[in-house]
């Protein structure tokens, strides 16, 4: 079975501004919280968007120490193994695996063209 896209993220240096922007633009509402990795968003700055609102689970966050970017996460059974395969095929690890095994583990890599992709899974 193919691995589906399971989550999107929009991050920048001013998460509150992004929350207001996407609330006004798309009517999104946010539940503020923390991600599983501070490499994704600074603590307390991540606004989760429910799939019933955005069509896909996602979040808007970041902080002054993080770069602006938009990316999606692909669901996999084993984040570490998928990351190793991405590297073997010419991708480059950005970070990970990071998170809570058995609950949620994430990683990011760039493909051979430099596009940023996320991985998410239980291990």
Image (cartoon, rainbow, N blue to C red):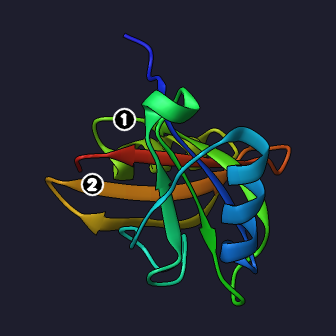
Q: How many marks?
A: 2
Q: Is residue 59 left or right of residue 102?
A: right
Q: Is residue 70 left or right of residue 73?
A: right
Q: Residue furthest bottom?
A: 65
What residue is shown with label 1? 76
Whether 3 is drawn above or below 11: the answer is: above
State the residue at coordinates (77%, 74%): 67
Residue 81 appears at what percent x and percent y?
Answer: 36, 45
- In what quadrant of the picture does the N terminus appear? top left
Whether 117 is drawn above or below 95: the answer is: above
* Label 2 Cα neighbours within 10 Å, binned few <14 / some 14-19 / many ≥20: some
Whether 99 is drawn above or below 6: the answer is: below
Q: Is residue 43 left or right of residue 41?
A: left
State the residue at coordinates (40%, 68%): 35
Q: Residue furthest left?
A: 102
Compare marks 1 and 2 and give the one earlier in the sequence. Answer: 1
State the residue at coordinates (68%, 48%): 71
What residue is shown with label 2? 104
Residue 56 appears at what percent x and percent y?
Answer: 51, 31
Looking at the image, which is closer to me, 44 or 26?
Answer: 26
Residue 7 appears at what percent x and percent y?
Answer: 50, 40
Looking at the image, which is closer to me, 119 or 93?
Answer: 119
Looking at the image, which is closer to me, 41 or 99?
Answer: 41
Q: Secondary structure at mark 1?
A: loop
Q: Which mark is residue 64?
A: none
* Label 1 Cα neighbours within 10 Å, binned few <14 / some 14-19 / many ≥20: many
């Amino acid at each position: 079975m193919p691995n589906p896209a399971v989550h999107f993220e929009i991050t920048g240096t001013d998460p509150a501004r992004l929350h207001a922007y996407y609330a006004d633009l798309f009517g999104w509402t946010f539940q503020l919280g923390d991600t599983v990795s501070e490499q994704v968003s600074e603590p307390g700055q991540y606004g989760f968007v429910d799939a019933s609102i955005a069509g896909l689970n996602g979040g808007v966050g970041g902080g002054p120490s993080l770069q602006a970017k938009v990316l999606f996460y692909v669901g996999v059974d084993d984040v570490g193994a998928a990351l190793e395969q991405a590297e073997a095929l010419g991708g480059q690890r950005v970070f990970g695996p990071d998170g809570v095994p058995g609950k949620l583990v994430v990683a990011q890599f760039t493909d051979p063209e430099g596009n940023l992709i996320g991985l998410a899974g239980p291990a």
